[in-house]
Amino acid sequence: MFQSIMTPVLALAAWTLVMLLWMYATRLPAMQKAGIDATKIQDPAELNTLPIEVRRIAHNYNHLHEQPLIFYVLCIYGHLAGVADELNIMLAWGYVALRILHSLIQALWNFVPVRFAVFMASSIVLVVMTVRNVIAAM
């Protein structure tokens, strides 16, 4: 399980789907309670009337489709190029753990200074992975 850099890729993809389910489990009842008919929404801004607790989960789901794209590319490159060594695998797992922590902070608490610190830590992990892959490619 911890010997392949592709396993953290699978873990983050699975976590993204957990957030998708969480989003719908909170959004659909909130829309019903607010009297919002999904078939009549003309502008996504209409969802801004939903409670912030519901919107934060949706925002996080969207965030999991932004920066993690770089993570997926780095892991796939490392796997295909044969540079997915033990350190890169540990970095990949660290990134996944930080993104899960980021999700939980944003969805449950959303104290921005802490969330930002976790985001920056995950960004540093990506920078280290990128540098290691570029060096290996040279």
Image: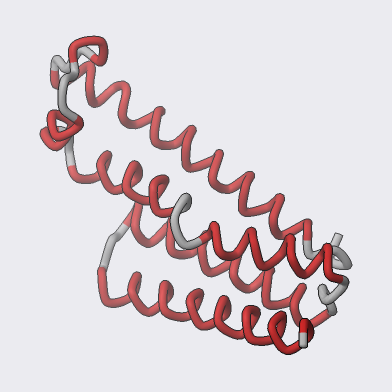
Identify the image quadrant of residue 24: top left
Is residue 13 placed above or below 2 in the rendered structure?
above
Say left or right for 21 vs 106: right
Where's residue 127, x and y in %? 55, 82
The quarter of the image holding the N terminus is bottom right
Colour basis = secondary structure
- Residue drawn at (68%, 70%), measured in percent from left and top? 92
- Residue drawn at (14%, 15%), measured in percent from left and top? 35
For the residue pair 10 and 50, the one nearer the viewer reads as: 10
Is residue 14 placed above or below 97 in the rendered structure?
above
- Residue drawn at (50%, 74%), measured in percent from left and top? 122
Is residue 43 placed above or below 103 in the rendered structure?
above
Where's residue 16, x and y in %? 54, 45
For the residue pair 64 and 51, the one nearer the viewer reads as: 64
Where's residue 102, x and y in %? 43, 64
Is residue 13 placed above or below 40 in the rendered structure?
below
For the residue pair 65 and 55, the one nearer the viewer reads as: 65
- Residue drawn at (17%, 17%), measured in percent from left and top? 36
